């Protein structure tokens, strides 16, 4: 297992986040050049490893995608 990987779980995204949301977050951050995967976060991960602006932008994308999937 690569110890440099930053693991993302749904708990990191909020109370109503799903596994799919966390997997999508990992995908979006990977596209931005981060070494991230879905999974339980490990001790020793530092929150500042991912820029807040990148994290927030990915959250916005996930939120917008979820809105588009909901029926009117």
Image (cartoon, rainbow, N blue to C red):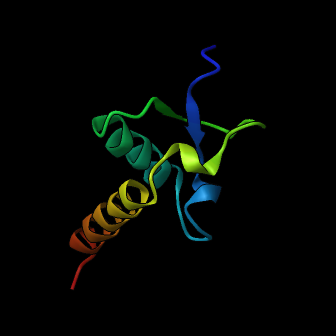
Q: Residue at x 28, y 74 (%)?
A: 67
How far across and down, in percent of the image, does residue 10 sit? 58, 54
Does residue 56 appear to the left or right of 32 in the view shown? right
Q: Residue at x 60, y 47 (%)?
A: 9
Q: Residue at x 78, y 37 (%)?
A: 43
The quadrant in which the C terminus is found is bottom left
The quadrant in which the N terminus is found is top right
Answer with the quarter of the image where residue 69 lies: bottom left
Q: Residue at x 45, y 29 (%)?
A: 35
- What residue occupies the far bottom of the structure in this picture? 72
How far across and down, in percent of the image, does residue 36 sit? 48, 33
Does residue 43 appear to the left or right of 52 in the view shown? right
Closer to the camera in the image, 6 or 18: 6
Does residue 36 appear to the left or right of 53 in the view shown? right
Position of residue 31 relative to residue 58, above or below, is above
Closer to the camera in the image, 35 or 71: 35
Closer to the camera in the image, 34 or 37: 34
Query: How many marks can you see?
Result: 0
Position of residue 17 relative to residue 30, above or below, is below
Does residue 46 appear to the left or right of 13 in the view shown? right
How far across and down, in percent of the image, does residue 14 sit? 58, 68
């Amino acid at each position: 297992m690569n110890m440099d990987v930053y693991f993302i779980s749904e708990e990191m995204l909020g109370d109503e986040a799903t596994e799919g949301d966390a997997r999508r977050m990992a995908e979006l951050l990977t596209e931005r050049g981060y070494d991230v995967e879905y999974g339980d976060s490990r001790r020793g991960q530092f929150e500042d490893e991912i820029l807040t602006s990148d994290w927030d932008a990915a959250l916005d994308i996930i939120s917008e995608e979820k809105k588009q999937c909901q029926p009117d």
